[in-house]
Image (tube, grey):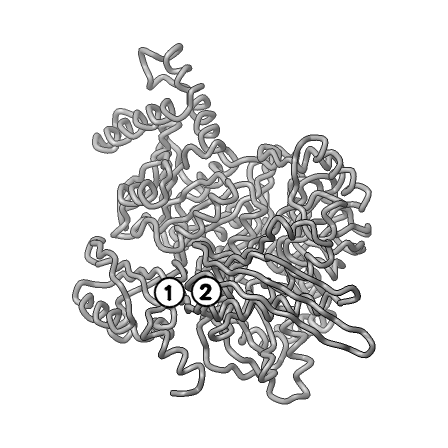
Amino acid sequence: MSARALQRIIWTRLRAGPQSCRWRLSWYLRRHYVALPDDIKSLRAVLNPDISKIRNIGIMAHIDAGKTTTTERMLYYSGYTRALGDVDDGDTVTDFMAQERERGITIQSAAVTFDWKSHRINLIDTPGHVDFTLEVERALRVLDGAVAVFDSSAGVEAQTLTVWRQAEKHHIPCVCFLNKMDKPTADLNFSMESIRLKLKATPVLLQIPIGSGKNFTGVVDLLTNQKLIWNLTSTQDDGRTFEAKSLGPSEDPELLEAAGEARTALIEQMADLDDEFAELLITDFGDNFEAVPTDKLQEAVRRVTLARKGVPVLCGSSLKNKGVQPLLDAITAYLPAPNERHHDLVRWYKDDLCALAFKVLHDKQRGPLVFLRIYSGTLKAQTAVHNINRNSTERMSRLLVPFADQHIEIPSMSAGNIALTVGLKQTVTGDTIVSSKASAAAAARRAQSDGGTGTKRGDHADIGVVLSGVEVPDPVFFCTIEPPTMAKQADLENALNCLQREDPSLKVRVDPDSGQTILCGMGELHIDIIHDRIRREYGIETYLGPLQVAYRETILQEASTADTLDRTVGDRRHLVSVSLTVRPVDSASCEVAFTELQVQIQPEIKEAVENGVHSSYLQGPLLGYPVWGVTSLIHSVSVEPGTSAAMVSACVSRCMLKAMRLAGGQVLEPIMSLEVTVGEEHLGSVLGDLAQRRGTVREIQSRLDNKMLLATVPLAEMMGYSTVLRTVTSGNATFSMELDAYEAMNPHDQSTLLKRMSGLM
């Protein structure tokens, strides 16, 4: 067949639609070009095993540690991709957004489902950049285990600490993978020590590397006492096959000695961490610890991992295709199944459906796609489900198995899995989905009789046990956004609504004075990505104003005041009198409390008072930034009969503003924790630049031939820092930063800010 004829067939299939093209063209090529291998598993063949064989895991790490590359190898070795994708080439499965492929970074979490040795693995590849930390948070909220990937030459880095804290908050067992063992600067002992000191975790070493740098060829499995060797003969070798061989007397004496010492240390460590294993050692193997069976040692490692007393540590090089298969084995062997996580709500809902919506995507053809983690019951397509948070019932039209941006439709999915649904138009991140209002009420009754207290919200607290949602961090940057013409304003509002539903860390508001739309995000990169997505996905060329830092405000001292609002609207008089006290507190939260005399006021009046207080916290007395660290004590509220709740809230809000002005205002600025890795020859230039940015150096560490600088710097001084750092170091430095705290701005800087914001400078 001629090339022109083949081109005509391809064009015909493309006109028939991408789905038709993909399947029919694939069939045509397989039929006529037998050189193409047909060994790729279909998602339809993914195992649907018992819940004990399911693993819901996340890949988390600092940026550039190798998360996506590791995920690519897992998909390839499990048989679900034909070729090994590469981040630099922009052809990975999980980084499918145009921005991800252009920049070589993960921006949004992507879910893939595959099987490995009779286990079903639902894996979520998460971003490593601090601007997209919410993606990690909402993924970990619904996962049962995690793989923490480390650059073995760097150990624990800034964002590693952040994602580890997120995993700790959700009590998630972890496995550590020391990646990039082929780098000349890879250091196993340094990485282990950084896990111990910085993460306050107990690393359990299960493998030691064979060779170092370019000579890294494999690992010694300390449990089985085998060496696993990847004899890659060329750069094209995919590492699918490797040699497993028991260590014998003929091996290198140094390797035998190192492996023996490491295995003995592992056995002793397991005896310290696991009482059952310690008893086994004493009773059955007191004379010879080395005779402990491999399966008993593996069982001990699993118990320690699930109890979060220790974290198994494996090593390899994903880019060089070494060590990934043992990592997959460790995931199935040591991380928990969904039924081992012991969620109370599973007991309360029994066989009824209960699921949590943790992510929303928008598809131009199918509308909103909602990711659900199913905790109990079975989810079926073409059925109605009840959203407890929205108190609404929606019909789910289709049910899909997620595989990055490709999905396979299925009729049902059981508990313990992650599903993608079509048709839930009102559901947002953090919503609890159940089969019906009646099943939710029944679960609430079981929870009360069981003495349990589910997380309850709003007006729907009495109709069901609600899963705790996802904590959304406050934005730290904002800027104005404008459409090219007023005719595009409605399109821009629709785009922003869709993007907000996808990304809860993106906040959009309208300035009440100027009427401008304000875009609030987690960082420069976050806002830049949103701007680019609006252009590419919605076809709107928007204009962004200059980036500004999202400060906070607090008060300096306690202050009391009273206020009265007396207004007549039509023939109706509204009369409210309020007295209150505001006090500074040492926390980021803002609270409202009532004196004993006011506790028994009417519920609708109390709610109106609380609404007035909380609305005043949204805009501080100095610059209108949100208020932190204030408690309001309501002494008295006198309301004339017939006064509306809105008038009560307005009076309380006005009184609050007066009290906070009397208490004196203080601006709080975000302080970033900065980590810079730079050669010693450029250290002086970096230090000088940080001094000009009001930076405070905390520590300078040596890391092989480089220096690692740890500092705190105000976020306002860090705009455009990557460009400056690249200039002063000739591109020979890297940095990362995360939000450390909000601190009081010094009087001089606060005065300068107030003048600038008032337009006096």
Q: Is residue 198 left or right of residue 539?
A: left
Q: How many marks?
A: 2
Q: In terms of depth relative to the viewer, which is nearer, 409 or 235?
A: 409
Q: In terms of depth relative to the viewer, which is nearer, 58 or 659?
A: 659
Residue 96 found in image quarter: bottom right
Is label 2 in a helix, a strand or a loop? strand
Q: Where is the N terminus found, in terms of image quarters?
A: bottom right
- Residue 496, how many percent across, how many down? 62, 73
Above or below — where is 270 with respect to 83?
A: above
Above or below — where is 144 with respect to 235?
A: above
Q: Is residue 523 left or right of residue 377?
A: left
Is label 1 in a helix, a strand or a loop? strand
Q: Where is the C terminus found, in terms of image quarters?
A: bottom left
- Residue 643, how many percent across, how many down? 76, 67
- Using the numbered discs, state the Cα–Cα distance from disc 1 to disc 2 in whole angstroms: 9 Å
- Residue 538, how many percent across, how many down? 63, 76
Q: In terms of depth relative to the viewer, which is nearer, 224 or 380?
A: 380
- Residue in the picture at 28% in, 61% down: 711
- Residue in the picture at 40% in, 82% down: 755
**Residue holding disc 2:** 554
Q: Amino acid at mark 2?
A: Thr
Residues marked 1 and 2 touching at CB (< 8 Å): yes
Above or below — where is 78 with respect to 125?
A: above
Work out whether mark 1 precedes mark 2 in sequence or the reverse, and give the earlier one: 2
**Residue holding disc 1:** 744
